[in-house]
Image (cartoon, rainbow, N blue to C red):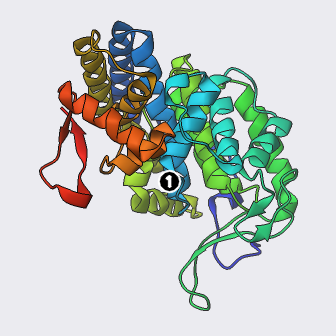
Amino acid sequence: MSLYKRRYIYERADWPAIDIDESAVFAQLGEIRFLQGKQIGKLEALGFEARESAMLSAITSEVVKSSEVEGELLDELKVRSSVARKLGIDRAGLVESTRDIDGVVEMMLDATQRFGLPLSEDRLLGWRASLFSAGRSGLSRIRTGEYRDEDMQVVSGAFGKETVHFQAPPPERVKTEMDAFLDWLSVPDGADPIVRAALAHFRFVTIHPFGDGNGRIARAISDMMLAQAEKSSLRYYSMSAQIMAERKRYYEILEETQAYTGDLNEWVFWFLECLLRALKASERALAEVMKKTEFWDRFRDVEMNERQRRVLNILLDGFEGKLKTSMWAKLAKCSTDTALRDIEDLVQKNILVKDPSGGRSTSYTIL
């Protein structure tokens, strides 16, 4: 007899070994592998610096968007700076990051750059400690070194009018569920590795082993497993950016599949479709990387100081917003007078152009 009014997929006798029909996603898997090979080929043709730029942009997007899915907004420049420093990309590390951002970045880099290491309980708890490096989730103090010991619901709506979307397994089941999950992760079972990434994401977020951070850790696990499937630490697309773009459906398909009668094949199909869309979106990102490479080829003989080169790299990496003298000063860590001299020099060299609106709102764009 269920402890809860509604019944969920983890109460089924065949959980977690629910049959998956891989033949239904055969075409998707073929298209995914085609796009992966095509894009890796493009990156290899671009050279080391272009690969660095693509990776910096993809990991920054993954960190920012995975947090945004949960409603937490991170400063993209600070995330980019943290990723750049930890990857040893000096040219982009211009803005000071914060302890909490560094922790989220450390978790993502550990997942994607050390993808070949087994995900042990100790490593997983380390990820959660990094995710909540200050020991708090919002205003609440949390314990990061253990699984939850209380009931957990996924709810939405105003206080007193909440809708319960999912009731996680009772706390006394969490340790057993997680031991089985980590054992399953460590031993290939013959399933396609990309399908396993989809299953791992769903299984972890369904167990819901922590009081907070389950979604972000689930996405880090699927990123790790996608890196395993590709046998590469080179990240050039952001699955979380695509999930954020489809956030409403993401939560809907999770809720539908987590129901007792849910169809796990539907989740796998959606996950692979989302991955396909992420890969197609990355083609546009790679086009920006190629544009950046062409930019530096065009201006390779133009004399610039180090400040100018580093700020231009930030702009070329997808900077959003208007470039004003005050923003240049912030990015370059210099006075506004120095920033104005840097900008005017680049305008004279036909690298920047002043936008039509003038006066106090003067802004600039790369030609």
State left or right for residue 361 relative to residue 191. Answer: left
Comparing 289 with 339, the one in front is 339
Percent x, y of residue 280: 30, 33
Residue at the image point whose x is 43% and y is 15% from the top:
49
| Residue sitting at the far left | 356
Q: Quadrant of the C terminus?
A: top left
Percent x, y of residue 295: 25, 20
Percent x, y of residue 56: 48, 29
Percent x, y of residue 101: 64, 47
Please determine whether, in this image, residue 165 is positioned above or below residue 192.
below
Q: Quadrant of residue 319?
A: top left
Q: Quadrant of residue 221?
A: top right
Q: Which residue is mark 1?
A: 263
Q: Amino acid at mark 1?
A: Asp
Please determine whether, in this image, residue 296 is positioned above or below residue 178.
above
Total numbered circles? 1
Q: Is residue 13 visible?
A: yes
Q: Secondary structure at mark 1?
A: loop
Residue at the image point whose x is 34% and y is 11% from the top:
46
